[in-house]
């Protein structure tokens, strides 16, 4: 398995929407390389015949009654928003075209 | 502090009662809930703040707690059907880990990104505390988004271990464990994803339980790793944990992973009083090499006591546990990276604008998450994003999920020869603040004995096993049972606790240093 390097971390940080300084990228790359190395053995632990477990206690077909329940008012839903306008969340520009 | 109630208990004696003892005195009218709640609020004011304070609380909820206490007292004083119907823990105060959302108090998850945020809804467990009329003393400190084993990753400063203020209280729920250990609360709620209830319990000399996955609703617990997270009790006695577990447990339609069927009577199990004929399995892989000598000694003492009480001690092997830590550090960050994507600077919490350039949503998100998340959270998000990325998914996340199956099979096999499994809760006693902060991997190794239970969904309980010879700090003993058999933990835990306390001549916490004596007077006003 490939080791993780500084370019990988820069790419992953972009995917995860976390701005990182050059110093942070250097440090994070070093730390993550050690962690990734330590978890490598996991990929050799189980053969192809072992099924994956995504959930510790399997439950299936969990439905609720199709009835109207409690919902937030617009005011409640917006109470923690950093910016709102006319009962809606106010989002910065999606495209850089202003 | 010297004001007496009808029983003649001083405030410093009142705060040392177990929740069960306090509940009895409340029901008998010997103490009022307002007296008890005020005694705890005074204790918080005395030992929690200041430079050398415990710093277990991020928010103190005095006004509401006293109002609930007064309501319980009024109902009791009036008598009749309403008084009869009061829950057994009505009027007994509790602290809540700040990962669990509450109306009327801020919820920060220990993160700057949620500073000042107020939830518009209560977690199901909080609704149940309110229904039982338990005064909520406040919100307790934690590693940011519950990511850590020392509470040093909190954006609001570390919590200190009441046994030694220069040491860590464990994590992520160091605040809840320290609050209970420092007699700032009789009960607390924690959350346990890889040991965040049990390891703090171990290093602070308190009891912590990670229940069977799904037996307590996760609705309103800010998710780190949804397939591993579990809310549970943090207390000073095993019986108190059973009592609290029964308040907060049971099916919740708002959590699709909530188990539909109830668990057996946990309080009755804690009162069983014998372990005769029970088979208790030592897990070969979870003691010995890598475990501090003093931890190993207290573990062996516990085995000896259980044997004398009539339990049969057997040895079991769980060979795949060697992969558990690695699998955990792939699954947990993967789920966390996805769960934490919701902190986008739009719907709640912090929004930080980039210093220059275009103000697009992408750049605002990048700046907000850079400023709002701490180092450990960033590390785990990056690691999770890596494990889930195309080309690596099968090798990392996929393999880790297979290991999860192998760990479950190990447990299944072990539980065919043992009714309950036993191990030390953590490989060492509390380390010093700062000691492992620059070495994430060393920090992760602290969870080696607690993680298998989360991967398999089985319940685990940690209780005080005594003090390590070399440093005089608390050691935790962990009990594990098959899924849905939480009652076994309470049965064995309560018996072991009473045998140990008979040996010590009282609770382990009676040997902890007196914090009040060292609290600087000027900080007592501050909090």
Image (cartoon, coloured by chain):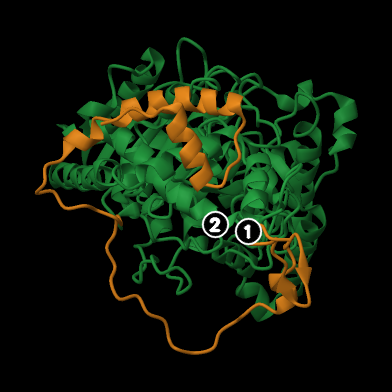
Chain colours: A orange, B green
| Spot occupied by residue B97 in the image (x, y as percentages of width and height) | 61, 48
Q: In this picture, is B229 found above or below B196?
A: below
Q: Camera-side residue: B330 or B519?
A: B330
Label 2: element kind: loop
Which quadrant is the N terminus of chain B positioned in?
A: top right
Q: Camera-side residue: A2 or B288?
A: A2
Task: Report which residue position mark 2 lands on.
Answer: B221
Left or right: where does residue A36 sit relative to residue B520?
Answer: left
Question: What residue lies at 71% left-to-right and 77% top-to-bottom?
Answer: A74
Left or right: where does residue B60 sit relative to residue B227?
Answer: right
Question: What residue lies at 27% left-to-right and 43% top-to-bottom?
Answer: B400
Q: Camera-side residue: B27 or A27?
A: A27
Q: For label 1, count other residues whose C-alpha is less than 10 Å away and answer few (under 14), some (14-19) or many (20+).
A: many
Task: Report which residue position mark 1 lands on.
Answer: B101
Q: List the single residue furthest toward the bottom.
A: A67
Q: Can the viewer see residue B180?
A: yes
Q: List the single residue furthest toward the left.
A: A49
Q: For label 2, count other residues whose C-alpha is less than 10 Å away and answer few (under 14), some (14-19) or many (20+).
A: many
Q: Can the viewer see residue B318?
A: no
Query: Which comes before the other along the chain, label 1 or label 2?
Result: 1
Question: What residue lies at 52% left-to-right and 55% top-to-bottom?
Answer: B244
Task: Give the number of callouts.
Answer: 2
Chain letter behind tag 1: B
């Amino acid at each position: 398995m490939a080791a993780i390097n500084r370019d990988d971390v820069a790419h992953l940080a972009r995917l995860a929407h976390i701005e990182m300084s050059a110093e942070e990228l250097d440090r994070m790359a070093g730390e993550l390389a050690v962690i990734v190395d330590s978890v490598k053995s996991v990929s050799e632990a189980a053969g192809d015949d072992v099924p994956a477990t995504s959930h510790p206690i399997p439950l299936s077909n969990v439905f609720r009654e199709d009835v109207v329940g409690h919902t937030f008012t617009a005011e409640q839903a917006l109470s923690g928003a950093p910016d709102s306008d006319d009962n809606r969340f106010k989002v910065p520009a999606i495209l850089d075209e202003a | 502090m010297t004001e007496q109630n009808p029983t003649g208990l001083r405030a410093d004696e009142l705060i040392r009662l177990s929740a069960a003892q306090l509940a009895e005195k409340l029901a008998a009218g010997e103490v009022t809930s307002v007296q008890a709640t005020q005694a705890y609020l005074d204790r918080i004011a005395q030992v929690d703040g200041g430079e050398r304070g415990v710093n277990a609380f991020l928010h103190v909820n005095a006004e509401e707690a006293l109002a609930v206490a007064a309501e319980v007292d009024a109902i009791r004083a009036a008598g009749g059907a309403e008084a009869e119907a009061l829950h057994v823990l009505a009027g007994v105060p509790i602290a809540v880990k700040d990962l669990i959302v509450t109306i009327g108090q801020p919820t920060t998850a220990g993160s700057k990104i949620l500073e000042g945020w107020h939830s518009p809804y209560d977690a199901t467990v909080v609704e149940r505390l309110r229904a039982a009329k338990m005064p909520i003393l406040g919100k307790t400190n934690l590693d940011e988004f519950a990511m850590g084993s020392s509470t040093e990753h909190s954006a609001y400063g570390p919590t200190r271990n009441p046994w030694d203020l220069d040491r860590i209280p464990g994590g992520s729920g160091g605040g809840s464990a320290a609050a209970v250990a420092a007699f700032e609360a009789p009960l607390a709620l924690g959350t346990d994803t890889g040991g965040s209830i049990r390891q703090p319990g171990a290093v602070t000399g308190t009891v912590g339980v990670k229940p069977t996955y799904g037996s307590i609703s996760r609705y309103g617990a800010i998710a780190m790793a949804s397939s591993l997270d579990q809310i549970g009790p943090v207390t000073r006695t095993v019986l108190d944990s059973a009592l609290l577990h029964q308040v907060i447990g049971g099916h919740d339609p708002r959590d699709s992973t909530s188990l539909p069927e109830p668990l057996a009577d946990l309080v009755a199990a804690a009162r069983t009083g014998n372990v005769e004929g029970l088979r208790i399995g030592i897990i070969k892989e979870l003691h010995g090499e890598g475990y501090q000598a003093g931890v190993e000694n207290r573990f062996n003492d516990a085995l000896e006591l259980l044997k004398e009480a009539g339990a049969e001690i057997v040895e079991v092997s769980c060979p795949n546990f060697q992969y558990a830590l690695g699998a955990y550090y792939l699954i947990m960050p993967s789920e966390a990276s996805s769960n934490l994507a919701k902190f986008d600077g739009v719907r709640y919490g912090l929004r930080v604008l980039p210093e220059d350039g275009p103000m697009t949503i992408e750049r605002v998100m990048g700046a907000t998450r850079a400023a709002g998340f701490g180092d450990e959270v960033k590390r785990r998000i990056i690691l999770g994003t890596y494990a889930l990325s195309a080309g690596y998914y099968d090798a990392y996340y996929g393999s880790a999920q297979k290991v999860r199956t192998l760990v479950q099979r190990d447990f299944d096999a072990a539980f065919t020869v043992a009714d309950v499994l036993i191990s030390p809760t953590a490989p060492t006693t509390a380390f010093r603040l700062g000691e492992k902060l620059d070495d994430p991997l060393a920090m992760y190794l602290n969870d080696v004995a607690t993680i298998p239970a989360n991967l398999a969904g089985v319940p685990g309980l940690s209780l005080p096993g005594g003090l390590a010879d070399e440093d005089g700090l608390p050691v935790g003993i962990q009990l594990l049972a098959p899924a849905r058999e939480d009652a076994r933990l309470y049965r064995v835990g309560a018996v072991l606790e009473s045998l140990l306390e008979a040996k010590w001549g009282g609770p382990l916490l009676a040997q902890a240093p007196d914090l009040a004596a060292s609290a600087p007077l000027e900080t007592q006003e501050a909090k």
